[in-house]
């Protein structure tokens, strides 16, 4: 039943085999044995795709309910253990300065959970790639996933006071053309991240002159602190530097756009204790002031 459900959800023998750790031929043979036992075809196969038959759709709903009950029974037994344990595969955005302290605290709190962490800015397929959970920002579009809001961050334009003393304080977006702008480049796509400058619902239409580009937020933060230019960074990245005066904000009337962080996990699986522990811990500790 597990094999059948994986093929039905992924629409691929190869992807199902990869997720289950077996060959695609073993998956095909397993489906053939299932169809022989049932006396009906559950899949329509072609060289390019796999789709459910009408009988397969009926059988899928039954199998999901049965497997959910089995998983629930296993979870009840797992819940009797002293603490959650096992391997937890998580995908996270490339903001290690925000994530690492919370992940360290989580690892200390749950030493029996083996963390398998993947930092990436690409949109991963949680189910197809076998992740237990992902942390992401932006709009949610995959109906196969459940989600919990972790909090939000605000973007700020910042620079070192010494830099502004040398080059002047920009009073509006148009003034940025005379400054060195430290721009973030997305590692996967190679595109430059647009600064979310707007006021009264109107976006600032300006081409920013690149003083430097980097695919690493912490690098942009460091270079801004060293007086090499102006960066547009999330508030959690610059909070300490603003507090101790290493950085100062500019264009406050034009900034304020926020980005919401979410933790997501597959809706077609029972929530394992280790996944529940991760979801709850991140919701409590990642951005508690902005939740």
Image: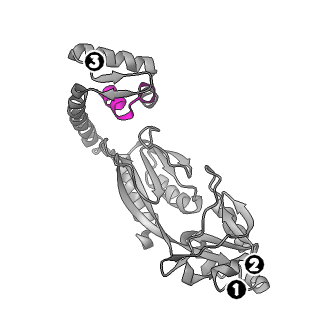
Q: Is residue 243 above or below residue 79?
A: below
Q: Is residue 35 left or right of residue 7?
A: left
- Marks 2/3 in contact by CB < 8 Å: the verdict is no
Residue 4 part of the magenta segment = yes
Marks 3 and 1 sit apart, C-alpha to C-alpha, by: 71 Å
For the record, the magenta segment spans 1-16
Question: Label 1, on which residue?
Answer: 169
Marks 1 and 2 sit apart, C-alpha to C-alpha, by: 10 Å
- Marks 3/1 in contact by CB < 8 Å: the verdict is no
Q: Residue at x 79, y 84 (%)?
A: 166
Question: Label 2, on which residue?
Answer: 178
**In terms of image quadrants, where is residue 232?**
bottom right
Q: Earlier in the sequence, mark 3 or mark 1?
A: 3
Label 3: state its secondary structure: helix
Q: Earlier in the sequence, mark 2 or mark 3?
A: 3
The quarter of the image holding the N terminus is top left
Q: Residue at x 31, y 23 (%)?
A: 43
- The answer to whether residue 278 shows anywhere in this view is no
Q: Position of residue 265 (x, y in %)?
A: 38, 48
Marks 2 and 3 sit apart, C-alpha to C-alpha, by: 69 Å
Q: Is residue 62 above or below residue 253?
A: above
Question: Label 3, on which residue?
Answer: 34
Q: Position of residue 142 (x, y in %)?
A: 38, 49
Question: What secondary structure predominates along the stretch shown in magenta?
Answer: helix
């Amino acid at each position: 039943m597990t094999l059948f459900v994986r093929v039905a959800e992924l629409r691929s023998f190869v992807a199902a085999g990869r997720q289950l750790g077996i060959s695609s031929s073993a998956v095909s043979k397993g489906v053939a044995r299932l169809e022989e036992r049932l006396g009906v075809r559950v899949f329509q196969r072609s060289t390019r795709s796999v789709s459910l038959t009408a009988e397969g759709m009926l059988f899928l709903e039954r199998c999901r309910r049965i497997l959910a009950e089995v998983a629930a029974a296993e979870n009840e037994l797992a819940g009797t253990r002293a603490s959650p344990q096992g391997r937890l595969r998580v995908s996270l955005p490339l903001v290690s300065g925000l994530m690492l302290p919370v992940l360290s605290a989580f690892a200390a709190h749950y030493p029996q959970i083996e963390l398998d962490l993947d930092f990436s800015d690409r949109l991963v397929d949680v189910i197809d790639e076998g992740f237990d959970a992902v942390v992401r920002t932006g709009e949610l579009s995959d109906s196969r996933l459940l989600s919990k809001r972790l909090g939000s961050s605000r973007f700020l334009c910042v620079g070192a006071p010494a830099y502004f003393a040398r080059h002047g304080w920009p009073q509006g977006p148009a003034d940025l053309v005379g400054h060195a702008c430290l721009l973030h480049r997305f590692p996967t796509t190679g595109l430059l991240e647009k600064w979310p400058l707007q006021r009264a619902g109107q976006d600032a239409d300006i081409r920013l002159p690149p003083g430097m580009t980097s695919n690493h937020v912490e690098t942009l933060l460091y270079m801004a602190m060293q007086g090499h230019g102006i960066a547009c960074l999330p508030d959690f990245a610059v909070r300490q530097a603003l507090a101790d005066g290493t950085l100062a904000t500019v264009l406050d009337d034009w900034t304020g756009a926020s980005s919401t962080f979410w933790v997501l996990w597959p809706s077609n699986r029972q929530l394992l204790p280790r996944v529940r522990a991760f979801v709850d811990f991140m919701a409590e500790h990642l951005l508690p002031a902005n939740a």
